[in-house]
Amino acid sequence: MAVIAIENAKNWQDKYRQIMLVGKVLAPLAEAYKVEAAQVKGCESQAWLYHHQLESAHFFCADSDSRIVKGLIAILLSATHGKTTSEIANFDLEQYFTQLGLSGQLSPSRTNGLTALANAIKQFAAT
């Protein structure tokens, strides 16, 4: 699993490279879906998020115009995609990124954007 590759990376450059590789897993959104209503507010770069609920499970698709942000989105979605409302509500972004060795490595603007994305996922799951 790609998240394990990030955990096992020996230094920040390797982690950065792994994050961008993970981002390639996300299919790009068609331009028609890159609309303001789907934009995640709080991200320095542009990021779009869509949600679908099937019974009690929540599914997401997302994209970004930044390769590193797209990778971070893919990592976040790997932890929340297909989860229940309760599982998503209890998801601890800070703890998850500490486990991956990413805490303190991201710029404040990327951390804020990632937090905004995690909050948007939680908000979708709560409705």
Image: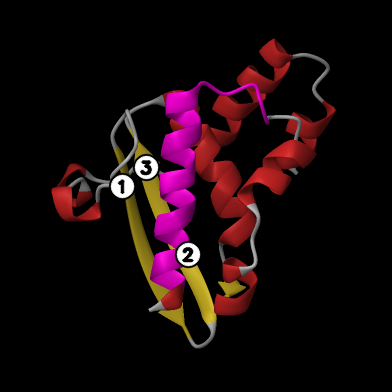
Magenta residues span 103-125
The amino acid at mark 1 is Val
| SS for callout 2 | helix
Q: Disc 2 marks which residue?
A: 122
Gap in angstroms between the C-alphas marked 2 and 3: 17 Å
**Where residue 10 sits in the image (x, y, percent)?**
83, 17
Q: Is residue 32 left or right of residue 22?
A: left
Q: Residues within 10 Å of mark 3 (few under 14, many from 20)?
A: many
**Where residue 46 sits in the image (x, y, percent)?**
28, 34
Decide whether residue 3 is among the magenta residues: no
Q: Can residue 2 be seen in this view?
A: no
Q: How crowded is mark 1: few (under 14 residues within 10 Å), some or many (20 or more)?
A: many
Decide whether residue 109 is among the magenta residues: yes
Quarter of the figure with the N terminus: top right
| SS for callout 1 | loop
The amino acid at mark 2 is Lys
> To which quarter of the image does residue 60 belong?
bottom left
**Where residue 89 sits in the image (x, y, percent)?**
57, 69
- Residue at 56% x, 62% y is 81
> To which quarter of the image does residue 121 belong?
bottom left
In the image as oriented, which residue stretches furthest toward the bottom? 55
